[in-house]
Image (tube, coloured by chain):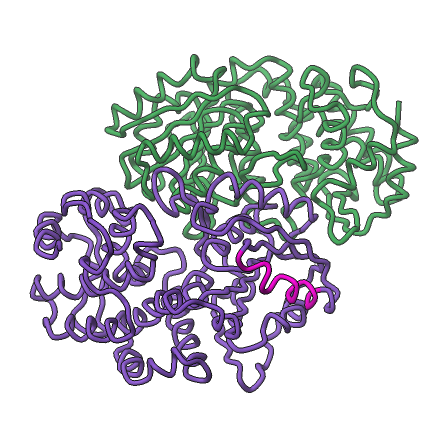
Chain colours: A purple, B green
Amino acid sequence: MNAITPASAERLVRVPLGERAYDILIGPGLIAGAGREIAARLKGRKAAIITDENVAPLYLGALVASLEAADIQASSLVLPAGEKTKSFEHLITVCDAVLTARVERNDAVIALGGGVIGDLSGFAAGIVRRGVRFVQVPTSLLSQVDSSVGGKTGINTHHGKNLVGVFHQPDLVLADTDVLNTLSEREFRAGYAEVAKYGLIDKPDFFAWLEANWKDVFAGGAARIEAIAASCQAKSDVVVADERENGARALLNLGHTFGHALEAATAYDSRRLVHGEGVAIGMVLAHEFSARLNLASPDDAKRVETHLKAVGLPTRMGDIPGELPPAEVLMDAIAQDKKVKSGKLTFILTHGIGQSFVADDVPSSEVLSFLKEKHP
Amino acid sequence: MNAITPASAERLVRVPLGERAYDILIGPGLIAGAGREIAARLKGRKAAIITDENVAPLYLGALVASLEAADIQASSLVLPAGEKTKSFEHLITVCDAVLTARVERNDAVIALGGGVIGDLSGFAAGIVRRGVRFVQVPTSLLSQVDSSVGGKTGINTHHGKNLVGVFHQPDLVLADTDVLNTLSEREFRAGYAEVAKYGLIDKPDFFAWLEANWKDVFAGGAARIEAIAASCQAKSDVVVADERENGARALLNLGHTFGHALEAATAYDSRRLVHGEGVAIGMVLAHEFSARLNLASPDDAKRVETHLKAVGLPTRMGDIPGELPPAEVLMDAIAQDKKVKSGKLTFILTHGIGQSFVADDVPSSEVLSFLKEKHP
């Protein structure tokens, strides 16, 4: 695959994974240019687009037109929007659509949508013919900076979220920043939590830059593109160091252990809490918990909270509307999370802003008494 | 994982795939010794055994006892026997059983059975938690010499066989040769077709050895173990050269393009034709087709046919009981086979015994007129 020189407003992040290396393009107008970019990188001339009912009316027509102009034969499948679509049932539907479109190994599955569509389509791309090409066209900030990069795909089962899937790297990611203009403020903020996360993991300068420039990031334009590119670069660095999550990649779960427990405790009801909001509260909790264990200064936790609150994100369990189950129930959800190794709790803790680390022997009694203390 | 020195009657074939390297142990009594061998190689202490109704009454008890004696907590799932079990429906059942058993990344899924159980369980092992450990305990000659080695897993859909799956290498293969004593003559012969295939691909000396020693291989004992070990070694060599089937691995499909078409033409009715029998006829046809294209001597095709006929395998389309559809229908089945790249037919052809090669531009008109000529 040839690297393409991006147009002036565009940024390019190359994920250097050897023979699985790929480009992330970030900038305006990329859906309209998708056919050209894909045709330049893929041998095949067939594509199966997977999207959802919310996204299809906005962008499917433009994507199909762009592919056809580049001589790529496109089929499309429109699925219901929402987390419930990440199921075996819909996986079967997607595989069937991809096979019906006679997509072969050098042809592509294209995910046009947010994290749900990306995770589901990527899984199908990873298993149809034991792997066909895969292009991500993420349409939410969250998926542009997180799920579309790194190759994790999967579905949910009644045992939990993302418990079935494969690692299947995309061949190209097209993060069209124009689409972010149609997101609600709340959706944009939720995605922003993951942007801030990269600063908190190991990029203190980026976090400071966000503290100074977040209003420009929210307003759009160059600062937004810069923030997305920096996030993709940060994620790429972690993924390249640990593609299959044997160690350092766990850092990407900063704030997620608490966050997932809160999502479970609110029954994944997006009216009460969406993923990025859970991560925002979880990141504050992770910093506070680290301070409680004398690993970091309480001032750092305060600083994280101040920034996330400034952008309008929830930062406390009490910010979630409605009743939460007791601390013991949250603790159970944490223990059932998949980041448990031989019974011990694995947590991402921190020594301060941009100094996160993986701790794999956190005593559950400490977590429980901390949760009791923080419970509203 | 430590290499274990095999007991005297045992053979060990190491598949050197870097961090995915694994051992194949071949010999008597390996089911009784499974707990010890698995415990020596896996960090986890949990295992989910997947097997079928035919195999369970014979070997499940011994395998569970062996695991428990080695302190490995074993659960088991018994599925219906037969090709229909390689479906999405049963994949979901297997994933659920593995998750219910709380199998984590360092624990194992154990496939106890033939190719169907191995392909299905390996697929589940490859996708639950994006990959857990996998142990193959193949109970047919076919699975011992073919499907249990190499990491191809998958299920069938209404679009065709093995169209959905992953590459997921096992961590250990235990080929217990005692279990072969309970196979029918016909089943053993069908597996033997794949043994002979390795000689025909690129090991003319092995083919000559089989011509001289096949009666001992069928009788059991040292010659049988030797033939299985040589087959596993041959398959390992091909897999190591091309793990994800981008090139040379296609050689393993010698005889399979014609063979699959015949299986499809007989609606996968095992009373008429089983896979190994289709491969036997397919290998004779591949040699004859190569001779017709002036690539090989007709004497080689004659020699292949003579040997396969001697062991009792079918070698002609006319040997299949019942009517076959016309050559045009067989041709359609070949064209729909997945080994089609951008519309061109890929075939494994040969320059003679042990001199097979991948031809990716075989004109379909030649294939069709050959099929018409050979049609009974």
| Residue B275 locus on image (x, y percent) | 67, 26
Total number of numbered discs in the rendering: 0
The quadrant of the picture occupied by the C terminus of chain B is top right
- Residue A64 colored in magenta in the image: yes
Which of the pair A191/B345 is nearer the observer?
Answer: A191
The residue lying at 23 percent from left, 71 percent from top is A309
| Residue B140 in picture, x, y percent from top left | 54, 23
Up-down: is B187 above or below A51? Answer: above
Does B204 appear above or below B113?
below
Q: Residue at x 23, y 55 (%)?
A: A258
The main secondary structure of the magenta stretch is helix
Residue B364 in view, yes or no: yes
Residue B242 visible in the current orientation? no
Q: Is residue B325 magenta?
A: no
> Which range of residues does the magenta coloring cover?
A54-67
Residue A246 image-quadrant placement: bottom left
In this rendering, is residue A205 above or below A116?
below
Q: Is residue A8 left or right of residue B63?
A: right
Residue A375, position as x, y percentages in the image? 13, 54
| Picture layout, residue A33 above or below residue B293 | below
Q: Residue A36, percent across and down?
A: 67, 72
Residue at x 71% of width, y 16% of height: B312
Point 61% across, 37% down: residue: B162
